[in-house]
Image (spheres, rainbow, N blue to C red):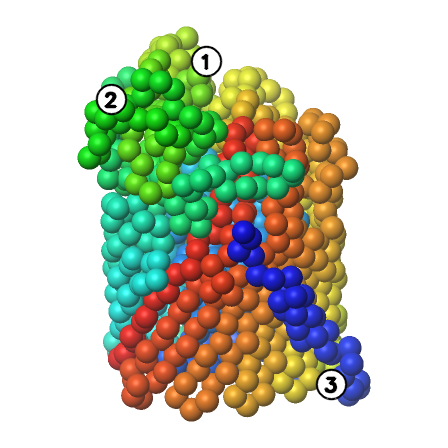
């Protein structure tokens, strides 16, 4: 029986969102254009000698956010701080209150509330697939989007195998807000970000005070979490913020192993100077969470059917009955891993940020961060279809060890990858000069230099085991002719790399402000140098899946470059209405995706052409407000040319493909007394226009829905506030063993509800329920076997918070 929300409900949600977002078309026409001074008020520069920082003011604990807030100053993906209403980019923001009320269980899950963003947040705390505006998710991760913390990348590549950027970041009480730029100048103001920038911005103690909280999960969520955050003044010109969390439990899926455990602590100290500021920051993350991979399913009549014993919303292949997984090291040694460790992430980072007014219109901005990052990715993936166990099968582990077994079995492939070194050192230095042109006009010229070194040290080792075909603590089996712990997939994936990717990027921007008109042009010249070595037992003359030939390491030694550009304009029709347009061209370089399973001459310096992934985008839109109603509408057109390697397919595929996507983003908010509502809707019409895989040409790219929508109504009555976050998607297509795009992933609507009550002036009790309807929401299927991944089922948690 389907657990999807009924179609009438989904239609009602979409209709309500459209009414909210398009309401401006029915409103009374706005007043005539106002003087240019009104624009200047929203876009004022910091006067010489002032110490204001280019950031929006922090919200006070318990303070309500103002919906879409077109006057909010943005700092992401722009060469000059400006309000949303004056920026020639599509940008959305989520404040700390919105993040809390959305009940997001991870950084990627929070992104589902942003129009234009496609976030497949079904992989757990991290391991998410994220893209923007119909750009493809062709192998995993976030190839075309850069995840940032306070303006610098978490990883230089968003689609490293088994290491997505959200692996090394967590949202907690130290997070002030989220800014998401889609398209626009992202291609020229960041490296490897032609689709957009997702910037998680932390608190800096601008507002004295803080909060401490404890939350307890129930109704399917086994989790206890403690959070804190506090900041304020240390002196007349010095302030600080310190925050973090500790949590433990099983998570949303019961594997009987209490897998979740970890903490994060981060903070900063800011010293205000006579002509600017300098800030020192740090972060320590040591966290362990489940890796949620696809589970067994069956394909029938173009759809997905559940397999007996597996609930795609709740089942887990982790189990207390696993034996250690003994894997191959880079030097042909052996190391034993606890399969139930899941995904571990460790990060220690230090940073420096400064902004100095040099006088005579010059301003210097410097951002530096050094992060040591490592961990391990361990997850269990179905290696074949569920089938009857052959005669002679016995139970190998658990309370029934040694007994005959005549039930169903499945091969569990342990994706066991040691993230040996994913450290990133990044520095962004820019100088801007503002020229007064008279009559209220000005020209700002910006020149910058970005440098980074991304380490990529990984050791893969995939072994296979025979399991009971059950999602409830499966035991291992002894199957005649099958060797538990042997190399999976013919020994394809005993691989090692120790490589380094050095980026140097010079960039520049010009922005002309003349009355109600702003025109901006920017260019970026990226240079990438890749070096290092890699080994694969399948290809290096060793024993496939068993041992490397240590004398035949392959070399990584190449250079690649690209020049990106972006041109945009914004015109204020009046104080409440603006039009903008932009054209951009950018690139995402390949990291390890072009190393394994390719001709070694591609990366050892003998190839004259290194494949890159290019994106060209055109966009234009309207920003409008009337009283309590605010709307933001953007038309977009994107063209993508990419090279891709996908190791989850059978056989492994190397493809070159071109994609076209066009569509519409709508975002809006309305507030009237005790009622607030925000919403978004994205329509995408995408197609594959050329590919080395002829079977997909002319079709909609996999997992690309026509319509994705969000709606977040809430009501505040006295000390009580309650509401919901409604997120929905229409159907899409994905691959199966029958071929490309041969299964339908049904559309679904997820309702996350919350209610909070102020017990005292400082104490608040909040109830949050995720997936209230307990729907199955498939986000992907697999073309090598019957396997698909769904969002989690219904969970709930109760949080007690106290303002400090």
**Residue identified by numbered label 1:** 539
In the picture, measured across the screen, residue 750 lies left or right of residue 719, that is right
**Which residue, given by chain and number where applicable, does mark 3 sit on?**
35
Q: Which label lies toward us, 3 or 2? A: 2
From the viewer's perspective, is 65 left or right of 258? Answer: right
Report the number of numbered marks. 3
713 or 155, which is in the foreground? 713
Q: Which residue is mark 2?
A: 334
Q: Residue at x 46, y 46 (%)?
A: 312
At which x and y percent is residue 578?
72, 74
* Residue closest to the eye, 336 or 69: 336
**Residue occupying the point 60% across, 20% down:** 607
Does 428 appear above or below 650?
below
User: Residue 734: in sight, yes or no?
Assistant: yes
Discs 1, 2 touching: Cβ within 8 Å: no
Q: CA distance from mark 1 to mark 2?
A: 20 Å
Q: Is residue 194 visible?
A: no
Residue 104's disc is none
């Amino acid at each position: 029986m389907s657990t999807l929300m009924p179609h009438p409900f989904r239609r009602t949600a979409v209709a309500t969102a459209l009414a909210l977002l398009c309401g401006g078309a029915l409103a009374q026409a706005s007043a005539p254009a106002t003087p240019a001074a009104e624009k200047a008020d929203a876009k004022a520069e910091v006067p010489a000698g002032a110490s204001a920082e280019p950031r929006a003011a922090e919200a006070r604990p318990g303070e309500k956010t103002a919906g879409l807030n077109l006057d909010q100053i943005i700092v992401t993906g722009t060469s000059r701080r400006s309000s949303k209403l004056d920026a020639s980019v599509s940008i959305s923001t989520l404040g700390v209150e919105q993040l809390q009320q959305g009940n997001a269980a991870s950084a990627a899950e929070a992104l589902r509330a942003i129009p234009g963003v496609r976030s497949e947040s079904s992989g757990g705390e991290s391991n998410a697939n994220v893209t923007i505006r119909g750009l493809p998710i062709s192998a995993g991760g976030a190839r075309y989007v850069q995840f940032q913390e306070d303006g610098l990348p978490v990883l230089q590549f968003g689609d490293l195998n088994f290491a997505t950027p959200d692996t090394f970041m967590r949202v907690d009480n130290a997070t002030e807000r989220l800014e998401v730029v889609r398209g626009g100048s992202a291609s020229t103001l960041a490296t490897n970000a032609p689709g957009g920038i997702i910037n998680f911005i932390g608190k800096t103690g601008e507002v004295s005070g803080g909060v401490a909280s404890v939350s307890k999960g129930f109704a399917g969520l086994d989790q206890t979490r403690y959070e804190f955050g506090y900041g304020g003044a240390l002196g007349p010109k010095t302030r600080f913020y310190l925050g973090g969390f500790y949590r433990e439990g099983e998570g949303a899926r019961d594997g009987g192993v209490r897998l979740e455990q970890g903490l994060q602590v981060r903070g900063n100290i800011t010293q205000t100077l006579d002509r600017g500021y300098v800030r020192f920051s740090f972060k320590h993350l040591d966290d362990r969470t489940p890796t949620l991979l696809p589970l067994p399913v069956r394909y029938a009549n173009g759809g997905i059917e559940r397999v007996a014993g597996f609930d795609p919303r709740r089942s887990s292949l982790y189990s207390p009955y696993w034996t250690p997984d003994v894997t191959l090291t880079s030097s042909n040694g052996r190391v034993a891993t606890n399969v139930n460790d899941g995904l571990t992430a460790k990060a220690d980072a230090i940073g420096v940020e400064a902004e100095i007014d040099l006088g005579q219109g010059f301003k210097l901005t410097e951002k530096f961060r050094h992060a040591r990052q490592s961990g391990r990715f361990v997850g269990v993936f179905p290696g074949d279809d569920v089938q009857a166990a052959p005669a002679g099968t016995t139970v190998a582990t658990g309370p029934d060890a040694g007994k005959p077994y005549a039930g169903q079995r499945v091969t569990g492939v342990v994706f066991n990858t040691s993230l040996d070194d994913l450290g990133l050192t990044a520095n962004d230095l820019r100088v801007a000069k503002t020229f007064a042109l008279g009559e209220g006009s000005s020209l700002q010229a910006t020149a910058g230099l970005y440098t980074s070194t991304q380490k990529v040290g990984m050791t893969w080792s995939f072994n296979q085991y025979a399991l009971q075909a059950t999602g409830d603590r499966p035991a291992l089996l002894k199957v005649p002719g099958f060797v538990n712990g042997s190399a999976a997939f013919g020994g394809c994936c005993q691989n090692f790399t120790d490589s380094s990717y050095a980026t140097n990027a010079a960039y520049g921007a010009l922005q002309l402000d003349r009355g109600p008109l702003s025109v901006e042009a920017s260019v970026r010249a990226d240079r990438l140098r890749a070096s290092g070595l890699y080994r694969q037992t399948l290809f290096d003359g060793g024993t496939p899946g068993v041992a490397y030939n240590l004398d035949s390491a392959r070399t990584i030694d190449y250079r690649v470059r690209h020049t990106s550009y972006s041109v945009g304009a914004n015109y204020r029709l009046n104080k409440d209405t603006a039009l903008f347009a932009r054209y951009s061209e950018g690139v995402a370089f390949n990291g390890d995706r072009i190393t394994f399973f390719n001709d070694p001459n591609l990366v050892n310096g003998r190839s004259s052409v290194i494949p890159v992934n290019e994106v060209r985008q055109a966009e234009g839109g309207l920003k409008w407000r009337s009283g309590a109603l605010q709307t933001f509408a953007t038309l977009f057109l994107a063209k993508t040319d990419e090279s891709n390697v996908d190791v989850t397919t059978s056989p492994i595929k190397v493809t070159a493909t071109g994609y076209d996507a066009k569509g519409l983003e709508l975002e809006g908010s309305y507030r009237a007394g005790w009622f607030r509502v925000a919403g978004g809707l994205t329509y995408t019409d995408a197609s594959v226009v050329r590919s080395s895989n002829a079977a997909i040409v002319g079709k909609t790219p996999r997992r690309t829905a026509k319509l994705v929508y969000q709606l977040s109504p809430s009501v505040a009555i006295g000390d009580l506030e309650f509401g919901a976050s409604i997120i929905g998607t229409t159907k899409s297509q994905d691959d199966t063993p029958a071929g490309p795009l041969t299964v339908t992933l049904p559309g679904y609507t997820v309702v996350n509800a919350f209610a909070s009550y102020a017990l005292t002036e400082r104490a608040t009790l909040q109830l949050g329920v995720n997936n209230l309807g307990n729907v199955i929401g498939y986000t992907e299927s697999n073309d090598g076997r019957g396997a698909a991944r769904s969002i989690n089922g219904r969970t709930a948690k109760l949080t007690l918070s106290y303002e400090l």
